[in-house]
Amino acid sequence: MRKFFLLLLLALCLACSRNVRSDGTLDSLPPIWPDYAGVTVPCNIAPLDFSYLGDEPCRLLVGDRCIKGKDGCFIVPKRLWRAQMAADSLQLTVQVCRDGKWLSYQPFTVYVSRDEIDPWISYRLIPPGYQGWQMMGLYQRELAGYTERAIIENRLTGGNCMNCHTYCNGDPEKMVFHARASFGGTLLVNDGSIEKLNTKTDSTLSALVYPYWHPSGDYIAFSVNKTLQVFHSHDPNRIEVYDEASDVVVYNVHTHEIAWSPLTKAADRFETFPTFSPDGKWLYFCSARAVAPMPQEYKGAKYGLYRIAFHPEDMTFGDELECVYDAPLEDKSVSFPRISPDGRWLCFTRHGYGNFSIWHKDADLWLVDLQDGSVRELAGVNSDDVDSFHTWSSNGRWLVFSSRRDDGLYTKPYFTHVDADGKATKPFLLPQENPLEFYKRRMESYNLPAFTTGPVETDAFDLVRTMRDDAGINVTVKQ
């Protein structure tokens, strides 16, 4: 009972009268962070709490309700937010007190889409510096609330590197990720079973690297890469990751075999970042003319977008390679191709050179219309800094992507709605309670954000035991 009265008292302190007055108006929108003015959100998203960046006492009008700012932050009650999500939009007005008068900034609108977003995303949290990878983990976040849970943390595995988590059609029970260094191997979670794979063969450049599931769940496409990195002292792109060689192969999850085409493993080409079409009949990937020596010629590596037919019935490939987008012809390069679930839109990252665009400040999101082959920028989404890795929601109406737009150093997940005509809305930042303070304290980057249709329930200690105790299954080459 005492707890109830304390909560009631707190609510009364934070509330303000419904009969609020306005003693005048200001000609501008309020200075707020995150900038949620004019964004479109899904009807099942958590409340968009935000902060007023001025020093005056402030309050927020949401419909006929008033919320007092606490240290400049507006915490929108979940019940009020859910009620507002039933409408097509909501209007928000920030008021500030100056010389005893309450002045209203120009109101701004948050638009509400009836297209729901997948209920969870997962990501790797990692410090942005190359020396900080000893403290990292794979995490997941509920999007209707603020719950974050660890999938696995590398404090359980000797501080090794874990990367490249991905799912089959967003299914949290079909997941693959790599563990490098101690307990090294590829971990495959498949409907309750956990396998550790030893993926280096005598016929491939490296262990398997960048993955993408076939929609059937029977195959996973991987690149194999001989990857190095350099660190710039004066270049605005702080870190350069490049390949000295790379190929694309396909792995059979049932037979533990890999296969490839001579057209995905050409000696005079760099092939990387594979992705399957939603019908499973095409394998898309990025490919560049091989350049040498590296790293001296790293800016000469410019990747185009290609595809080859894939036959899932016998794990074979077509005889022709089709160029989808010849980016080098425009003196550009592409990375991270991802196709919407309806097969209409292919989103990719375009930048000046190379394939590892997560540190390239000119990296932007672009679209290929796979119906007519036209290519255009995803207008209204990109910033002056890095906008890079991205994933489609299961209904194809939302993209989550990583961006360094806030400070040029840390990547954060942003979301945009993409309609049936490929038009995108102003992106919004992953909501947090008191986001200004939250993101000030979070000293890690969100890496590889990916939608899932539910939470990953695989026990972290089962993953660790498999990594530690299992000798692993040796991947072989299909004969």
Image (spheres, rainbow, N blue to C red):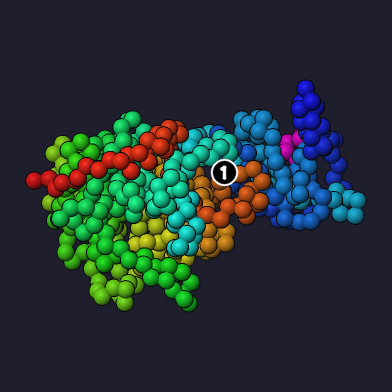
Amino acid type of the residue that numbered disc 1 sits on in the rendered structure:
Thr
Q: Is residue 64 magenta?
A: yes
Q: Residue at x 58, y 52 (%)?
A: 442
Name the foreground residue: 6 vs 53. 6
Q: Quadrant of residue 322?
A: bottom left
The quarter in which the N terminus is drawn is top right
**Residue 423 left/right relative to 175:** right
Q: Residue tagged by mark 1?
A: 40
Can residue 48 be seen from the camera position used here? Answer: yes
The chief SS type of the magenta part is strand
Q: Which residues are magenta?
A: 61-65
Describe residue 275's horizontal placement relative to residue 70 as left or right. Answer: left
In the picture as drawn, the residue positioned furthest to the right comes out as: 100
Q: Position of residue 23 (x, y in %)?
A: 87, 48
Residue drawn at the location 30% of the way across and 69% of the way down = 301
Above or below — where is 238 with respect to 478? below
SS type, badge 1: strand
**Front position in the image: 44 or 168:** 168
What residue is drawn where x is 19% and y is 45%?
474
Regarding residue 188, the answer to whether it shows in the image is: no
Residue 32 percent coordinates (x, y):
69, 53
Q: What residue is rendered at 18% in x and 56% in y?
A: 204
Q: Which residue in the rendered view is the most extreme toward the left?
A: 479
Q: Quadrant of residue 203?
A: bottom left
Q: Residue 36, image x and y in percent?
A: 62, 48
Judge whether residue 401 is colored magenta. no
Q: How many marks?
A: 1
Q: Residues within 10 Å of mark 1 (few under 14, many from 20)?
A: many
